[in-house]
């Protein structure tokens, strides 16, 4: 038998080692210790890991490779991080944003990342980052699946122009609706933003990925509204809550009601462990909370 591609001597994520992988017509058709066959192309993996492509479900490519610009985050908090980005934003140029993003994409692909969901800030009347990342998306399309989320970083209601700018970004081809309810001025504004943004997604037939409750405040419960809106608008399976770090600090009784609601309504949770364990709990003395969402319980 002849295959299109034969990868020899591969190690697999499940622990098998030294196996051969046969590919025909774009599909894996056999994985065995030793495949005796001809192939159009033979690759010796030399005992390295062969895995499906990695997927990064939460990234901010408009801010990539900008460490230290215009200065470092001294407090290590999310709030200073957002303020820093606000200082950098007016200094951005399209060429520099595209160049940094393309450089990052090269690094990502070299590590096996072939799909990235990136939020892109729409709180800039120029929509400079939006246009830059749409350009990058087109350029990397042959080898990297880049999905963009319209993200009102400074608040959907709190930032003047964000409501209109988010629609403009979607008109230009950004394909997922984002939000940041815990950063709006009040809890009520946050809940209202969740409702309005879910309605935008429903009207346009888009997905939702909302930065949700990225705080140590156990009373930040926008995930509850996100789940309820998902149910009301029939968005189940198309909605994700990113971070959900307040769940770390929530009362257990409340969580025992919340998690079945999330499951019932089809809302996904996106944990961001690397960033969350770095910036959460910064206002704590001792004990210092790690601020991770409840991954084992959400998976159960
Ligand atoms: Zn984020």
Image (cartoon, rainbow, N blue to C red):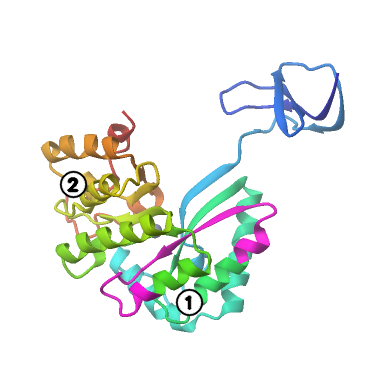
Q: Quadrant of residue 71?
A: bottom left
- Residue 2: percent from left, percent from top: 86, 23
Q: CA distance from mark 1 to mark 2?
A: 36 Å
Residue 136 bears which disc, if any? none
User: Is 234 placed left or right of 124 in the picture?
Assistant: left
Q: Nearer the viewer, mark 1 or mark 2?
A: 1
- Residue 252: percent from left, percent from top: 14, 37
Q: Residue at 58%, 65% (x, y): give it.
A: 101
Locate the C terminus by quadrant.
top left
Ligand 1 resides in the quarter of the picture at bottom left
Q: Residue at 57%, 55% (x, y): give it.
A: 146
Residue 249 bears which disc, if any? 2
Check disc 1 and report its element: helix, strand or loop. Answer: loop
Q: Is residue 155 magenta?
A: yes
Q: Quadrant of residue 50?
A: top right
Q: Residue at 57%, 49% (x, y): give it.
A: 115
Residue at the spot of label 1: 127
Badge 2 density bin: few <14, some 14–19, many ≥20, Cα 10 Å: many
- Residue 103 visible, this orientation: no
**Where 279 sits versus 22, above or below?**
below
- Residue 32: percent from left, percent from top: 71, 17
- Please state which of residues 29 and 238 is positioned toward the viewer in this rendering: 238
Q: Residue at 61%, 36% (x, y): give it.
A: 52
Check disc 2 and report its element: helix, strand or loop. Answer: helix
Q: Quadrant of residue 199?
A: bottom left
- Residue 108 visible, this orientation: yes
- Please state which of residues 130 and 213 is positioned toward the viewer in this rendering: 130
Q: Which residues are magenta?
A: 136-164
Q: Is residue 183 magenta?
A: no
Badge 1 density bin: few <14, some 14–19, many ≥20, Cα 10 Å: some
* Dot 1 or dot 2, earlier in sequence: 1
């Amino acid at each position: 038998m002849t295959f299109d591609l034969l990868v020899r001597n591969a190690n697999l994520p499940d622990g098998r080692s030294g196996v051969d992988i046969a590919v025909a017509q774009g599909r894996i058709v056999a994985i065995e210790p030793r495949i005796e066959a001809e192939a159009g192309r033979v690759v010796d993996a030399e005992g390295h890991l062969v895995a499906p492509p990695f997927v990064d479900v939460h990234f901010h490519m408009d801010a990539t490779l900008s460490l230290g610009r215009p200065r470092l985050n001294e407090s290590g908090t999310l709030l200073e991080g957002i303020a820093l980005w606000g200082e950098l934003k007016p200094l951005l140029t399209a060429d520099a944003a595209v160049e940094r993003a393309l450089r990052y994409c090269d690094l990502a692909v070299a590590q096996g990342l072939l799909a990235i969901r990136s939020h892109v800030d729409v709180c800039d009347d120029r929509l400079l980052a939006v246009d830059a990342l749409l350009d990058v998306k087109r350029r990397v399309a042959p080898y990297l699946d880049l999905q963009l989320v319209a993200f009102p970083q400074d608040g959907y209601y709190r930032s003047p122009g964000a409501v209109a700018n988010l629609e403009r970004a979607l008109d230009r081809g950004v394909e997922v609706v984002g939000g940041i309810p815990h950063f709006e001025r009040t809890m009520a504004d946050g809940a209202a933003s969740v409702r309005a943004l879910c309605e935008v997604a429903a009207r346009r037939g888009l997905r939702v990925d909302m930065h949700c409750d990225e705080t140590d405040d156990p009373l930040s419960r926008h995930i509850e509204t996100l789940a309820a809106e998902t149910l009301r608008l029939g968005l189940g399976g198309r909605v994700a809550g990113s971070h959900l770090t307040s769940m770390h600090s929530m009362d257990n009784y409340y969580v025992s009601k919340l998690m079945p609601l999330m499951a019932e309504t089809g809302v996904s949770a996106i944990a961001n462990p690397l960033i969350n364990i770095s910036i959460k709990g910064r206002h704590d003395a001792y004990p210092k909370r790690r601020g991770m969402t409840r991954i084992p319980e959400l998976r159960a």
